[in-house]
Structure formats: C-alpha cells, structure tokens
Image (cartoon, grey):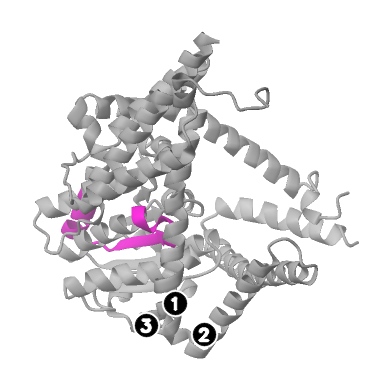
Amino acid sequence: MQRQIPLTIVLVMGIVMMVQFFIPHPISRSLFELVNKWARLIGVFALILGAGSLIFYHLTKIQRKAKGWGFSIVALTSLAFMTVVGWLAGPRSMGNPAALYQVIYANVQVPLGASMFAILAFYIVSASYRAFRARNREATILLVAAFLVMLGSVPLGKDIWDHFPKISDMLLKIPNMAAKRGITFGIGLAGTGVALRIILGIERGWLGGGK
Amino acid sequence: MTANAPEKKTFWQWLATIDRRILYLVMCLVVVIPLIAMLRSTVEVTSPVQDVFNAIESLAVHQKPLLVSVDFDPTSRAEMYPMLTAILRHAFARRVKVVELGIWQTGFGLAQRALNETATEYGMKYGEDYVFLGFKVGVDAVILGMGENIKKTFPVDARKIPLDSSPMMSSIRKLSDFGLIVSISAGTPGYQDWLLYAQARYHVRTAAGTTAVSAADAYPYLGSGQLTGLLAGMKGAAEYEALDAQHGFKQASTLASTAMPALSYAHIAIIILVIIGNIGFFASRRRK
C-alpha cells in the first residue's frame, strides 16, 4: 500500500497532464493552473527540506568534530544570522536596498561570490597548461579548435588576423552545433523514456528504499 | 647521497613543468596591467548581439513590454551584470516598459540593483514604466503559471505592492503579452527553461545572455531560431555596450568594454603558455 498510492498518483497525474497539454479547453486550463499552484507549494516545502538537511549535516559534523567542523559553525551562524536579519526586516525590506539584509548581501555575498569565481581564472591557466598536450590526433584537433575559438572570441584576435572571428563562428555554428544537437536529441529521447518508465511504474528508484 | 639527489631538469623539461606560481603571476599581470593602464579595444558587433538589440528596438516601435529574467548570482556577476545593465539601459532609453524577475534566489539583490540604477538614470517611474516581481520558488511551475496568468503567480511584486494596483500591469496579463523575454542566464535554471516553456508553449520571442563557457550550448537554439539573439560572455556585453554608445544612449555603461583588453591578453597568455608547455613536452620526450 505504501508503494501503491504514490505509484497510482504518478500514473494518474502523468497521464492527465500529458492529455491536458493537447486540450485547450477552460476546464483543462484551470486544472493546469491548479496543479501548477500545487507544484509551487511543494517547491516551498523542498526549501524547508533543504534548510533542514543543511542544518542536520553541519550539526552532525560539529558533534563528531569531523575535518573542517569549524567551517560548519561559520555556515550555521551565517544561516541563523541572515534568517534573523531577514525576519526582523520583514518582507518589505526586500525592495529596499538600504535594508541591513540587502547591505549584507551587497557587501559580503557579492564580493565573496565574485572572488570565488575569479580564482577560477588561475586554475584554468594552470590546468590548460598541464592538460592541453597534443599527444595524439584527436587531442591536436581539440587543441587547434580551442585556439581558434579563443582567438576569435576576443577583440585582439581580429587585430591579429581578421579571419579568426569568422573561423571561430564557423566552428561554433557547424561542428559544435551538429554535436550539441545530437547530444540534445539523445537527452530528449532518453528523458522521454525515463518519464514514461516512471509514469508506468517500471522505474521505481524515486520511491527510495533501494529496492 | 648523490643517488637520492633530485635530478636536475633540462631547459625543455622545465618548459613542460613550469611552477604553477609563475603561471598564476603571469595571469595576474596580464589581467591587472591592462585594467590599471585603462587600455581600450574596439569590439565588432556580431549578428546574435545585433539581433537582441534589434528585437528591443522593435519593442519600442510596437509598444510591447520586455521581460528580463535575472538568472545568475554573484559568482558570475562580472560577466552577467554588464549585459543586464546594457539591456536595461537600451530598453529605458527607448521607453520600453520592463518587467524584471529572477529564477535564482541569490540573484535577487543584483537584479534589484541593476533595475534601480538604470531606471533612476532615465527617470523611469516604478509601477508605470517598470516592475520588479522578485523571486518565486518553482522555476518551471512559475514560468508555466505566468503563461496562464501573471497576477495569479505573482499577486504582489517584490515590494509587496499588489500587481492589480500597478498601472503598467493592467495591460500585461500573461507571458504572451510580452514582445520579448531576455534571460541573463549563468546556468541551470536559465534560458533553456524559458525556451522550453515560454517560447515553445506560449510562443514568446526569447533571447539569452550566457557566460562565455556555456555559449556553445546555446548555438543549436540560435540556429533553429528558438533564440532570437545571444549575448555570449563579457564580449557579448561589450558589444551591446558599444551598440548603446553608438546610438547615443546617455550613461552608456563601459563595464564590459573596459575589461576587453584584459580578457584579450588573458586568452593570448593561455594560448602562449599551452604552446610553451607542448614545446617543452615534445622536446624533452624526443631527448629521452
């Protein structure tokens, strides 16, 4: 019974929503709006679940004094602090850039996030230097294509040779597009297959339990 | 003792294994020096960027509103924020009504800042010329909900003002009332969700701004015509800024344009370092 109820709900809702897509009737549209509203409400509960998991994970780490547990204290303190600040400021503060919540966001989260991403530039240069070796034919093609796209993607490339942007554009629009389309079609077909398997109850991994 | 002493590297081996700290220093210098020296470079406007620009121009002609979705967070601010402000400046300069929202909750503050900054420059009035819907959980459910009824999905805006009381929202009821959607997207969820639901289901023209690394993923949609136009990375933003400046829009931003020389030199430095690494690798292998 524990499994039959969710499987039945998925079967019925899966078929109903598929059929609904092709029927532009007011009843069908209002059903769609209703289900959509439910989906958004369930999304809110997912946020609660996410916050709960985060707290539980870090509390366990602190209790066990696992490696890096000090950072867990920082994470939990930050979470609690921002929650309290946001709560005290109230929902109207969301539109006010001078509110403490927004000031912290602009002066802590924005520079921290930007710094994290900026560090990537250094890792990219180190990784490309070490990994990009023309060891065989495929690697050489990849290397040359990468050089051409890089040179075509910056203004200096055009100053060096004005055909670089055209070659880069050609590489992106022809071989890249062909490969990406193939991958996208594959993903789409596989996604449809998995969706059908879930709706029909063949794929039951989402139920959990590992059986 | 001598048997355990580290073997001295040849010049070619050194070339193939340069210390990462030297690489970091090189990268730091090629980025910082052009920024300090305030070097300038000219950018040529590519057709996908021109297409986004033309689409917004057509909104002004047909008096259709623009929906801007801010789908990035502070980590990709450097690349995405200049795109956002350049597009908003263009829209406001042409008196196009703008509705902004975000499907990334951490992008809320940036979305709000860009809107306030650009709207103030052009003297736009909140509720009459622009509205900020904020963030709502649900991504696909939110887009689909907006396709049916925006006011049911967002009964109030980010300032908690009911949408019913907003003059400009009286004529905007669902997604199909927009002339164009622009998703400034740094990943997932992002422009693909707008394409899947808003463009495919409600037939609203959709354009995107993406990070440079994910631009290649967007080309199939550009080729198929599902994407009206594309701004790829900081260069895309610089091209849009150049278009804004060419058309004489006041306060045209140069955030991305000023970074172009640093970006160019960083790319060239990576290419040179990869070539050096390969020369060292093959030369030292041949000597063995």
Specify the label residue B102 is tagged with. Answer: none
How many residues crowd mark 2 within 10 Å: few (<14), some (14–19), many (20+)?
some
Q: CA distance from mark 1 to mark 2?
A: 10 Å
Magenta span contains residue B113? no
Q: Secondary structure at mark 1?
A: helix
Considering depth in this image, is B194 or A92 the residue closer to the camera?
Answer: A92
Which residue is denoted by mark 1 in the rendering? Answer: A104
Query: Of the residues under marks 3 and 2, which one precedes in the sequence?
Result: 2
Q: The numbered mark 1 sits on a residue in which chain?
A: A
Q: Residue at x 10, y 50 (%)?
A: B246
* Residue A130 horizontal/vertical position (percent): 50, 30
Q: For the stretch drawn in magenta, what is the main secondary structure?
A: helix
**Quadrant of the image occupied by residue A87:** bottom right
Which residue is denoted by mark 2 in the rendering? Answer: A85
* Residue B43 horizontal/vertical position (percent): 19, 41
Which residues fall within the magenta stretch?
Answer: B51-79
How many residues crowd mark 1 within 10 Å: few (<14), some (14–19), many (20+)?
some
In the image, residue B90 sits, relative to residue A128, either above or below, namely below
Considering depth in this image, is B32 or B103 the residue closer to the camera?
Answer: B32
Q: Nearer the viewer, mark 1 or mark 3?
A: 1
How many residues crowd mark 3 within 10 Å: few (<14), some (14–19), many (20+)?
some
Query: Of the residues under marks 1 and 3, which one precedes in the sequence?
Result: 3
Q: Nearer the viewer, mark 3 or mark 2?
A: 2
Q: Classify residue A125 as left or right of residue A151.
A: right
Judged from this view, the residue extending furthest toward the bottom is: A88
In the image, residue A130 sits, relative to residue A76, either above or below, namely above
Which residue is denoted by mark 3 in the rendering? Answer: A96
